[in-house]
Image: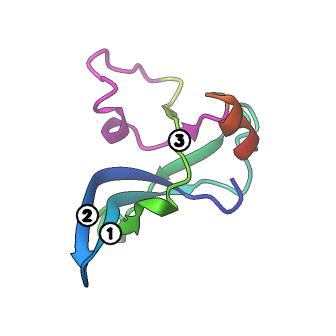
Amino acid sequence: MLGLEVARIQTFFSLIYELKVYQCALIHWFSRLGTEPDEDTGMWVVEPDVDEDGNANLAIIHVDTIFRAAHLLPAHQSDQFVSRDITMHDSLDTFNRFYVNRYVDYHAFEVLF
């Protein structure tokens, strides 16, 4: 993942400045934990970035700077049960840490090593 960052897209939007349309995204940044992938899984671990007040670290980026989608797997404590009520729609809001799944496809495997 050298040179790559992980972010969660909150929304896509466009704006017009001096008659030029800019396609943008509002994102929530994630930070890598550690300087190498997890020893057991071989996957990088990330967590959502927050400021000192606990607010999400948000930014606006141009969509051309998005390289590819990342598949995030929740990283939870093994001694705790996961609620059956959690769905794919709220898992990013429920968990605090995630594995960046490098095994999801060939391209992710090559890029995330």
Question: Three-letter amino acid code at disc 1?
Answer: Tyr
Q: Residue at x 59, y 45 (%)?
A: 45
Residue toward you, 49 or 59: 59
Residue range (magenta): 80-102
Residue 48: horizontal and vertical position, in percent?
43, 53
Disc 2 crowd rating (10 Å Cα; few below 14, some 14-19, many 20+) is few
Q: Residue at x 60, y 34 (%)?
A: 101
Residue 24 relative to residue 105: left or right: left
Other residues around mark 1 within 10 Å, as few (<14) / some (14–19) / many (≥20): some
Location of mark 2 (residue): 14
User: In the rendered image of this protein, does residue 32 appear above or below residue 40?
Assistant: below
Quadrant of the image occupied by residue 104: top right
Q: How far apart are the two marked residues, 1 and 3, measured between alpha carbons?
A: 23 Å
Q: Secondary structure at mark 2?
A: strand
Q: Quadrant of the C terminus?
A: top right
Q: Secondary structure at mark 3?
A: loop
Residue in front for this viewpoint, 7 or 108: 108
- Disc number placed over residue 70 in the picture, else none: 3
Name the mark nearer the viewer: 1 or 3: 1
Amino acid at circle 3: Ala
Is residue 63 among what the camera can see? Answer: yes
Question: Which is more N-terminal, label 3 or label 1?
Answer: 1
- Looking at the magenta stretch, what is its main secondary structure? loop
| Magenta highlight on residue 85 | yes
Where in the figure is residue 62, as x and y percent of width and height?
41, 66
Could you say which disc has been placed on residue 83 in the image? none
Marks counted in the figure total 3
Name of the residue lying farthest toward the front = 19
Q: Is residue 20 magenta?
A: no
Q: Which residue is mark 1?
A: 22
Q: Residues within 10 Å of mark 3 (few under 14, many from 20)?
A: some
Q: Earlier in the sequence, mark 2 or mark 1?
A: 2
